[in-house]
Amino acid sequence: MTERLRREGDALTWEAIVEDPVVFTEPWKITPRTVKLMTNIEIEEAPPCQERDLANATDLTHHSNTR
């Protein structure tokens, strides 16, 4: 499977082509999908993780978000 993402201005287009000679006689192209990017919205950062089993944890090295 080959995927292509293309941005032109505020539009993002996704295309995909599936190639499997055992299943398909020719490559199967998925209809491209275009979405308009929302430029007036600020993306919020994920909230910090709160360890719920802290009493049993010896350290936080198992966790990638140690904020």
Image (cartoon, rainbow, N blue to C red):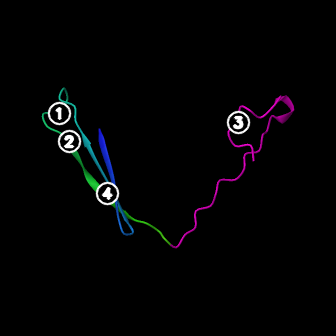
Front residue of 37 and 67? 67
Q: Say whether residue 49 is magenta.
A: yes
Q: CA distance from mark 2 to mark 3?
A: 41 Å
Q: Position of residue 63 (x, y in %)?
A: 70, 36
User: Is 33 on the left-hand or right-hand side of 64?
Assistant: left
Q: Secondary structure at mark 3?
A: loop
User: Is 47 on the left-hand or right-hand side of 16?
Assistant: right
Residue picked out by circle 1: 24
Name the amino acid type tagged 2.
Answer: Trp
Q: Say whether residue 47 is magenta.
A: yes
Q: Position of residue 29 (x, y in %)?
A: 21, 46
Residue picked out by circle 2: 28
Q: CA distance from mark 2 to mark 4?
A: 15 Å
Residue name at image x 20 percent, y 42 percent: 28
Q: CA distance from mark 1 to mark 2?
A: 7 Å
Count of numbered circles in the view = 4
Which residues, given as a range, are shown in magenta? 40-67
Mark 3 closeness class: few <14, some 14–19, many ≥20 residues within 10 Å:
few
- For the residues labelled 2 and 3, say whether their Cβ atoms are less than 8 Å apart: no
Mark 2 closeness class: few <14, some 14–19, many ≥20 residues within 10 Å:
few
Residue name at image x 75 percent, y 47 percent: 67
Q: Position of residue 50 (x, y in %)?
A: 77, 44
User: Is 31 on the left-hand or right-hand side of 67?
Assistant: left
- For the residues labelled 1 and 2, say whether their Cβ atoms are less than 8 Å apart: yes
Q: Secondary structure at mark 1?
A: loop
Q: Nearer the viewer, mark 4 or mark 3?
A: 3
Residue picked out by circle 3: 63
